[in-house]
Amino acid sequence: MGQEIIVKAVVTGGMGRMGQMFVRHLVDNPKTLVYGAVERPDHPHIGEDIGTLVLGRPIDAAIADDLLDVVIGANAVIDFTTPENSIACAKVCADRKIPYVCGTTGMDDAQKEKFLDIARETATMFAPNFSVGVNVLLGLARKAAFALGESFDIEIVEAHHRHKIDAPSGTALALAEAVRQGRGLSEDDYCFGRKGQVGERYEKEIGIHAVRGGDVVGEHEVHFLGDSEAVMLRHRASSREAFVRGAVRAAAWLQGKPAGLYTMADMLDL
């Protein structure tokens, strides 16, 4: 057997909530390390050691304002930032064939198309949710939609903290896609919330609803509602560590993979 590859990761948005969690996790894991970190050009801590800021001790990884300044020698980039920044990150990784893990949500159709065109030029894991449990939920939802059939109405409800800026969540949309495929429906059947005299629900409708408040990390429910019975699938994340662990696992899994777009289902062999 060959020697196990150490993941040398650059973390974008390193001083954000998710970025700091990635730093802690990568440092604590003997098979990974923080090779560098990136923040916006006007960030007050540019040039400082991110270990000192996050962990209280230096780790020889300064915060840069440009991914190009820290990516040479890295073998992974982990990016949970913004659509615009992720498109730029994908270009850097594609040009240098560096494995790229992206969990950014909120892309519109044009941004997503541009991002995917670039990202497929290197080994890229792009997922709305890196939780292992959520990805199992996606598979279950697809199978349930197929098995239960047209006699069950489908409603998706998600809840997140008050600071989340996009709605519905990327995971809720992924769940909608899963049940849509399972039932053989169209995106035209999506119904994003309801207000006023909306009329009776039609049988193909997939309701999608967003709740925002407090410090909710992430909750997703898929309701299959029949005339005399109901089936509910639910996932609750109690800590963002679930996403961090999955993303770091993805960075390790991508090592040595050919260029292309990969999903958590690929990694988990679902």
Image (tube, helix red, strand yellow):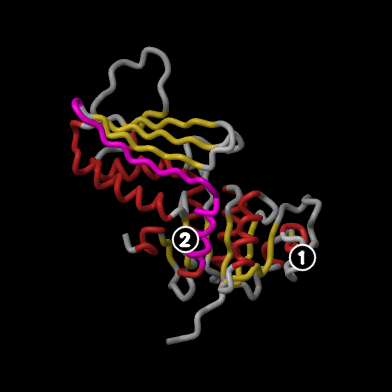
Residue 57 drawn in magenta: no
Location of the N terminus by quadrant is bottom left
Q: Is residue 173 visible?
A: yes
Identified by mark 1, the residue type is Arg
* Horizontal and vertical percent position of residue 167: 50, 35
Identified by mark 2, the residue type is Met
| N-term mark: 2 or 1 | 1
Residue at 18% x, 31% y is 151
The residue indicated by pointer 1 is 57
The residue indicated by pointer 2 is 125
For the residues labelled 2 and 1, the Cα–Cα distance comes to 31 Å
Q: Is residue 165 visible?
A: no
* Of the two numbered discs 2 and 1 in the rendering, the one whose residue sits closer to the viewer: 1
Q: Quadrant of residue 93?
A: bottom right
* Horizontal and vertical percent position of residue 20: 66, 55
Name the outermost residue toward the top: 197
Neighbour tally class for label 2: few under 14, some 14-19, many 20 plus, Cα within 10 Å: many
Between 64 and 57, which is closer to the camera in this rendering? 57
Position of 154 with respect to 51 (left or right) is left
Residue 230 drawn in magenta: yes
- 199 above or below 111? above
Position of 208 with respect to 149 (left or right) is right
Q: Helix, strand or loop at disc 1? A: loop
Between 128 and 230, which is closer to the camera in this rendering? 230
Q: Quadrant of residue 73?
A: bottom right
- 140 above or below 251? above
Residue range highlighted in magenta: 227-251
* Horizontal and vertical percent position of residue 28: 61, 66
Position of 15 with respect to 7 (left or right) is right
